[in-house]
Amino acid sequence: MLLKELSALASPLNDQQIGQLQQAAAELSPQQLAWISGYFWGLSQTQVAGQAQPSQAPALAASAQPAGKLTIIYASQTGNAKGVAEQLKEEADAKGIKADIFAAGDYKGKNLTKETHVIIVASTHGEGEAPDDAIELHEFLQSKKAPKLPNLQYAVVGLGDSSYEFFCQTAKDFDAFLSKQGATAFHPRLDCDVDYESAATAWRAEALDKVEEALKSEQGAADVVQLPLGQASPTVSAYSKKNPYPAALLASQKITGRQSGKDVRHVEIDLEGSGLTYQPGDALGVWYDNDPALVEAILAKTGLAADQQVDVDGESISLRDALIKHYEITLSNPQLVTKYAELSGSKKLAKLVEDKDKLREYAGNTQIIDVLGEKKAVLSAEQLLGLLRRLTPRLYSIASSQEEVGEEVHLTVGLVEYHKGEETRQGGASGYLAQRLVEGDSVRVFVEPNNHFKLPEDDNTPVIMVGPGTGIAPFRAFVQERDNRDAEGKNWLFFGDRTFTEDFLYQVEWQKYLKSGVVDRIDVAFSRDQAEKVYVQHRLLEHAAEVWQWLQDGAHIYVCGDATRMAKDVHDALVTIIEQQGKQSRDQAEQYLSELRKSKRYQKDVY
């Protein structure tokens, strides 16, 4: 308004210059405007007397363009992408590069027109889907609303697991979307596998060198207005993924019955003195040691000596210790199978390699020891380690509220175990927690926050929880928290497993909560207690009218557990409920559920 009034008065500026000033000022905050007024006054004091003034004010026109800077956006489901982005921010700060960092859910896509350099770090969720927090930005960039971005320089890092068909799909999507809108990649996209640390570290260094070089030529503009856009770098805990806390195991108690086909453990870990805190919905990262007996078996199959020295991260250690503490030796993957087919000359494996679907299925259901057993091959230590991925921590949904348990953390761990001929195969982390650790032993842990799986802020909000099997874990934490907060919101639990008598996890606790009124409803589905199989999605459909009414009343719905089947079946059941009870088309019902997800009323923690 002030600029419009000035244009009507006698002014040394022409109409075009005033228009340019209005355009530049429209995008600035009061703090930025105040800073610029002082900046321009300083320029006026250094102007040479009598110097001719350019009629088009080119310097002012240039100020309307975005000043050079780096913006980092992360799309994270379990925290890995967030960690890479935070490291990128720290390294940018160390190099003197001004950088802002945003979660994808906190970043407005239209602001990309104001950026000069953007790096996106994206994980992939489910079957090639964007993480929940990134759905809105992902959809925006492929919509008609997406702006043209001819002035944007960008780079993308993808985190994924090459065992899955849609490896790093979200990163590939963002790369394609930005390129289509006219943006230019200043550094090639990096698609990282599960052992991403070294590759990501090298990529960050190369990318930041390019950003630094590009911004040097724009330094004058970059120094004009560089106020943060709204998000500070998160505070880093004393204990983290890279610096885990050596906690004591307090308990590992089997909570399935003697006749159960499953071994599920309630695990309690002591956090006293660590300063670690967590919220319901967060995960606990567990660094585990591999089974020494499995290491010996692998060494026997490959003809290698346990005490042979190998280099790991610049340190010389025995091959045995390297396999126990530094490499993944249980889970197979398509790359390992492919490499071993070449090294061993196995015709069976070579045939599998030719069919990607069969290769993926075989790798997903066969442990490394059994891949090595397909055909004996004498390997060097370097060849063996070259087959293996680096060990990564396992993340477990936390099954307790600190309001209830204080300086402890509880987990619900299902032992992965099956028989291969006369031998028994176990999961690396679950076998460690359930059978190889004893009370008092040390276990290295850290807290992995999960901002995509959180109780509603309003304690009066109703909550529907769907958690079969060990998916019950975070809902034990949810209910403990709501009980301690005296939350008035209603709680409805759907739980399922094989049998009522052997597999009803935390049965006594749930009955107590139901009797006291903390939990309003519990509906259970025990698949093997009757002739026909009954699962949690069937119970949802049976109570369709009530589920719909809870949603109409503002309920948040949470799903935790198996991503391959259960989560998809529950999703389909919810769509059916919305379609039938809300009298909507299938597409409208899908859109309704999508809107619930965007507004954080439909959250999933699946694996």
Image (cartoon, rainbow, N blue to C red):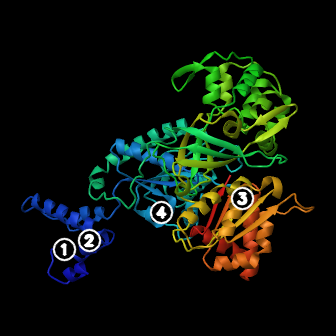
> Where is 269 relative to 573, above or below?
above
Residue 508 tag number: 3
**The residue tagged with tag 1: helix, strand or loop?**
loop
For residue 439, the mark is none
Disc 1 vs disc 3: which is toward the camera? Answer: 3
Residue 423 in the image: state x and y as whole percent.
Answer: 83, 31
Query: SS at mark 2?
Result: helix
The residue beneath circle 2 is 21
Is residue 463 shown left or right of residue 538?
left
Q: Residues within 10 Å of mark 3 (few under 14, many from 20)?
A: few
Q: Position of residue 565 (x, y in %)?
A: 77, 57
Label 2 amino acid? Leu
Disc nearer the start of the sequence (3/4): 4
Q: Is residue 406 left or right of residue 67?
A: right
Q: Nearer the viewer, residue 378 or 453?
A: 453
What kind of residue is marked 1?
A: Leu
Distance in Å between CA atoms under marks 3 and 2: 70 Å
**Mark before the other along the chain sequence, 4 or 2:** 2
State the residue at coordinates (27%, 54%): 223
Q: Mark 3 vs mark 4: give the one in front.
A: 3
Q: Residues at badges 1 and 2 in contact (C-beta under 8 Å)?
A: yes
Marks 1 and 2: which is nearer the front?
Answer: 2
> In terms of sequence position, does the residue under pointer 1 or pointer 2 come before the other?
1
Residue 428 location, x and y as percent? 69, 36
Looking at the rendered image, the disc whose residue lies closer to the viewer, 3 or 2, is 3
- Kindly identify which residue carries mark 1: 13
Callouts 3 and 4 close, C-beta under 8 Å: no
* Residue count near mark 4 (Cα–Cα under 10 Å), binned few <14, some 14–19, many ≥20: some
